Image (cartoon, rainbow, N blue to C red):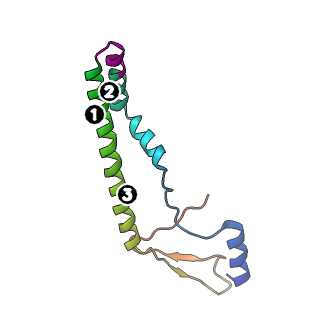
């Protein structure tokens, strides 16, 4: 592949990189944790306790939900940081063989090795 072909493909398709998951905002993560079916059930029970006048039970249940969501949030944050640090230690590389003779098909042929990753094209 000539340099001009490579530049044209780069402009057309963009860089050939592995896509990584974008981080979610703190409020969105909290909402996701609150939407857990168990937390929804507990919040419903706490609301019913509050309506029925049992304020002590409602406060205890709300506190349990708050504690559960807080612990899950901080554990998830720690594990995400650890996973990011591990990803930073791994350097993904790939060797590419370019055949320059006329009999080979156009393009580049990747040399696959153990644990090689390539982004998929649609």
Mark 2 and mark 3 lie on one chain; the one further toward the N terminus is 2
Task: Find the magenta span and give its range.
Answer: 47-54
Q: Residue at x 34, y 62 (%)?
A: 82
Residue in the foreground of this view, choosing between 98 and 10 = 10
The quadrant in which the N terminus is found is bottom right
Q: Label 3 neighbourhood size at 10 Å, few (<14), some (14-19), many (20+)?
A: few
Residue ranking furthest to the top: 52
Q: What's the distance in space between the residues labelled 1 and 2, CA to CA?
A: 8 Å
Identify the residue under disc 3. 80
Q: Looking at the image, do the residues carrying marks 1 and 2 touch, with CB atoms under 8 Å apart?
A: yes
- Percent from the top left, x then y, of residue 23? 48, 55
Q: Quadrant of residue 106?
A: bottom right
Q: Residue at x 38, y 28 (%)?
A: 40
Q: What's the distance in space between the residues labelled 1 and 3, CA to CA?
A: 24 Å
- Tag of residue 42: 2
Residue 31's place in the image compared with 112, above or below, is above
Residue in the foreground of this view, choosing between 66 and 20 = 66
Q: Label 2 neighbourhood size at 10 Å, few (<14), some (14-19), many (20+)?
A: some
Q: Nearer the viewer, mark 1 or mark 3?
A: 1
Q: Secondary structure at mark 1?
A: helix
Residue in the foreground of this view, choosing between 29 and 19 = 29
**Does 67 lie within the magenta span?**
no
Position of 18 with respect to 64 (left or right) is right
- Percent from the top left, x then y, of residue 61? 28, 28
Q: Residue at x 37, y 67 (%)?
A: 85
Identify the residue under disc 1. 64
- Percent from the top left, x then y, of residue 74? 33, 50
Mark 1 and mark 2 lie on one chain; the one further toward the N terminus is 2
């Amino acid at each position: 592949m000539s340099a001009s072909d490579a530049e044209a493909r780069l402009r057309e398709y963009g860089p050939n990189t592995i896509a990584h998951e974008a981080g979610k905002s703190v409020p969105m993560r909290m909402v996701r944790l609150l939407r857990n079916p168990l937390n929804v059930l507990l919040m419903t029970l706490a609301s019913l306790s509050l309506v029925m006048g049992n304020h002590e039970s409602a406060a205890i249940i709300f506190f349990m939900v708050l504690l559960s969501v807080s612990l899950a949030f901080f554990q998830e944050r720690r594990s995400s940081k650890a996973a990011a640090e591990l990803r930073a230690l791994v350097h993904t590389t790939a060797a590419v063989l370019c055949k320059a003779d006329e009999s080979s098909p156009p393009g580049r042929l990747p040399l696959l090795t153990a644990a090689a990753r390539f982004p998929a094209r649609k």
